[in-house]
Image: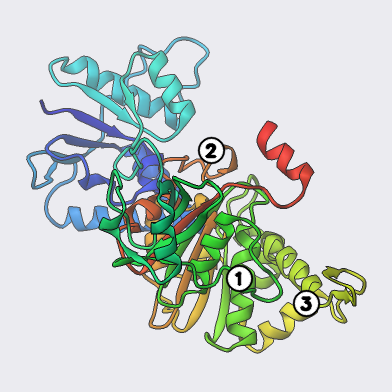
Amino acid sequence: MVKNYIIDTSVIVHDPGCFFNFEDNNVIIPIIVIEELDNLKRREGMVGYHARIAARELNRLRERGNLAEGISTGQGGLIRIELDHMDMGFVPPGIDTNKNDTKILAIAKNLQNKDRSIPTILVTKDVYMAIKADAFGIPVQDYNNDKVLCDEIYKGYRDIYAPSEVINQIFNGGIREKDLDLDTPLYPNEFLSITGSDNSNHKVLARFDGENIVPLRYARQSAWGLTPINREQKMAFELLMDDSIPFVTISGGAGSGKTILATAVALEKVIEKGQYSKILFVRPTVAAGNDIGYLPGTEDEKLRPWMGSFYDAIETLMGFRTSEKDDDDKTPRYSRKPLFSVDSFIETYKSKGIIETKTFTYMRGRTLSNAMVIVDEAQELTPHLAKLMLTRAGFGSKFIFIGDPSDNQIDNFLVDARSNGLVYTVEKMKQFKITGHVTLAQVERSPLASIAEKTM
């Protein structure tokens, strides 16, 4: 049955190409939404960028016909702009009828009443809009086209049991996937934590390289003084160190080691070994207050407060590299401080073009070649922006997305735990041999951080 889908501004700002994702149904865009997009087009950051992309998509449609009358989707439905049906007769006293949300709800309610034979549904990502629509008896849905709908998000590894003979074969070079009795096929670069079925003390961490199940290559190595300290960190370290895997995603809670692992490998490969020409730290700027464009100062000065996680990671790593050791004890002691500050270290390498800090506003049109690109807080991205970032990849680059995709760590109202750019890329890219993902499970920052992460 054909349905009428009323599209809210929040959906278009989340996915500016959403108009074509409703199959043979009618897509109705209230004129108020067009007005709101017009007001958003000059905003800095992802909201303004998506508003401008949506304008270009609508302009292409306008070239094919009259948007007020409706333009065929090519699948049996129509896309049209609704100019009428804003009667407020159903709105109870006390509701502000001048608000755009109320006008959009009025269009949805009046279209619903006009023809009960066609289901009319409001599609929004705005929670308050959804609550009000429900109160007015308007069917409401979230936009699910790019939402991850699987029961469990891919974590990049699995725990299994196998005979000690099989574990020994892995240690000696590897086995084929068919040599294990697995319920489902492995994805390329998926890890296995294997425990002996006949000896629980016999264990191995292994990786499926797309052809064979092989032992880890880098688990006992360090980068910029940092050595992974738990099994998930060893898996992530394996992906970060392997230059044949140009796209790595790492998720995990606060203090699990995402940023420091990625930063350590980047410093090792760029500054220590010169395998890449530069490090690019990228972070989406999602704030409760003014966007970055309204803040005073240069781009670097504006970004400094947002880059605290990278500065903290580098400060910790500098402590590792300048620590002394007792003659009788190989454990490092933090007995002396670095000879230079973190800020001076970063500014020195920035002046040489070896370290860059950027936000997504300045990524469009760039091609990033022979660089290590670390995208922090990737759970704040929309799937559209995640795709934009990955399409910047030039030859010889390695991209690393890190973040915590749980709802309590997302400040961007356009995404949630199932529709953000991090989980979207994890699910879309897990099938390819040149990508890898690991979810870090343990908090290593401190005992206090671990307790807070688990209990609060």
Of helix, strand and loop, which one carries label 1?
A: loop
- The residue shown at (77%, 69%) is 315
Tell me if residue 51 can be seen. Answer: no
- The residue shown at (23%, 23%) is 120
- The residue shown at (89%, 73%) is 328
Residue located beneath label 1 in the image: 220
| Gap between marks 2 and 3 measured at Cα | 36 Å
| Gap between marks 3 and 1 measured at Cα | 17 Å
244 with respect to 380 (left or right): left
Residue located beneath label 3 in the image: 321
The image quadrant of residue 80 is top left
Residue 395 numbered tag: none
Say which quadrant the C terminus sits in.
top right
Q: How is the image coloured?
A: rainbow
Counting the numbered discs, the total is 3
440 with respect to 450 (left or right): left
Residue located beneath label 2 in the image: 407
| Gap between marks 2 and 1 measured at Cα | 34 Å
Say which quadrant the N terminus sits in.
top left
User: What type is the residue that disc 2 sits on?
Assistant: Asp
